[in-house]
Image (cartoon, rainbow, N blue to C red):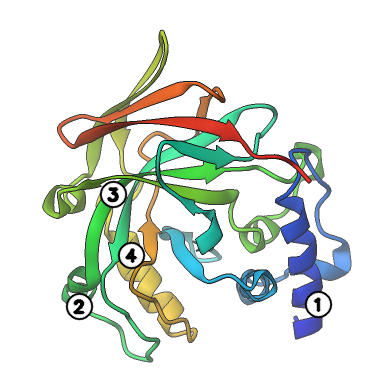
């Protein structure tokens, strides 16, 4: 895929993020055909936004022909009493996760970083919400590579309170609950890759070899403990990770443009 095509595809995908309506898949001439194509479109989106990368989402690759990786833009990383996200079929959709924030730069290099080096580079750990927006219409049957190019339904990241680093690293399972007034949803949460830091080891070395440098302050999320959770807007939401922490946040609807 050439640079011009990547930029054209990225422009379309970025515009899709500003609507709460489901959209058609990319035109055939703009569709990625390889993982490299999809990642080039992701990079073009960052270039067009003129925005620094504030974090990444990742999981261990589920198959030889699939990777789970997407940048999260700095402007889409939030904290505080409210969290703004785009409605998805009228609902607020989130994934409860742990965010691992880098305290040191990890420059791109050809050789692998060791687990010890990456562990040392991780500073604060936070309770976190991945903000979800499924943008393609279900009827469109968009291919995995298009969804990858589009950021794997990511719309942003909310950072909650800090967690003890040792406990965050060891959090293979978490009993968690999300409460809105009398509606309480409880989950026997299990990390999809068992060890929540394992995807970071893969992410750093995979992207580093592609010339991507990771910067201090970037927040890395590695998978939901409960899949996608559907919540209401404009209601105080209590989120509890048993034995780890709790916080309250109000989800508010972003305005479509």
Please state which of the two labelled residues, at mark 3 or mark 2, is closer to the viewer.
3
Q: Nearer the viewer, residue 66 or 177?
A: 177
Secondary element under disc 1, as helix, strand or loop, is helix
Left or right: residue 60 compared with residue 69: left
Q: Position of residue 198 (x, y in %)?
A: 28, 61
**Cα distance in 3D space between marks 2 and 4:** 12 Å
Q: Quadrant of residue 107?
A: bottom left
Left or right: residue 111 compared with residue 76: left
Q: Position of residue 165 (x, y in %)?
A: 16, 54
Residue at point 42% right, 12% down?
Answer: 181
Which circle marks residue 126 in the picture? 3
Secondary element under disc 2, as helix, strand or loop, is helix
Q: Please give the residue where the numbered disc 4 appears in the rendered image.
A: 200
**Cα distance in 3D space between marks 4 and 1:** 30 Å
Q: Please give the residue where the numbered disc 2 appears in the rendered image.
A: 117
- Up the image or down, 43 lies above or below 73; here it is below
Left or right: residue 256 compared with residue 170: right
Q: Please give the residue where the numbered disc 1 appears in the rendered image.
A: 5
């Amino acid at each position: 895929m050439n640079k011009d095509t990547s930029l054209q595809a990225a422009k379309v995908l970025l515009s899709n993020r500003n609507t709460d309506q489901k959209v058609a898949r990319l035109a055939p001439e703009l569709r990625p055909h390889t993982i490299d194509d999809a990642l080039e479109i992701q990079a073009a989106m960052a270039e067009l936004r003129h925005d620094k990368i504030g974090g990444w989402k990742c999981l261990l690759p589920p198959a030889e022909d699939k990777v789970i990786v997407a940048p999260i833009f700095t402007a889409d990383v939030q904290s505080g009493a409210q969290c703004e996200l785009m409605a998805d079929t009228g609902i607020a959709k989130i994934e409860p996760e742990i965010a691992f924030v880098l305290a040191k730069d990890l420059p791109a290099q050809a050789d692998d970083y060791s687990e010890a080096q990456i562990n040392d580079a991780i500073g604060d750990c936070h309770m976190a919400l991945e903000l979800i927006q499924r943008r393609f219409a279900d009827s469109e049957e968009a291919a995995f590579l298009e969804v990858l190019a589009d950021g794997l339904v990511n719309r942003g990241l909310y950072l909650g309170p800090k967690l003890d680093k040792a406990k965050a690293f060891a959090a293979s399972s978490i009993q968690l609950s999300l409460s809105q007034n009398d509606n309480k949803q409880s989950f026997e949460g299990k990390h999809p890759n068992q060890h929540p830091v394992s995807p970071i080891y893969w992410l750093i070395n995979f992207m580093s070899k592609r010339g991507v440098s990771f910067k201090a302050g970037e927040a890395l999320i590695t998978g939901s403990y409960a899949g996608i959770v559907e919540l209401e807007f404009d209601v105080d939401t209590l989120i509890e990770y048993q034995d780890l922490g709790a916080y309250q946040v109000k989800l508010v609807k972003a305005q479509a443009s």
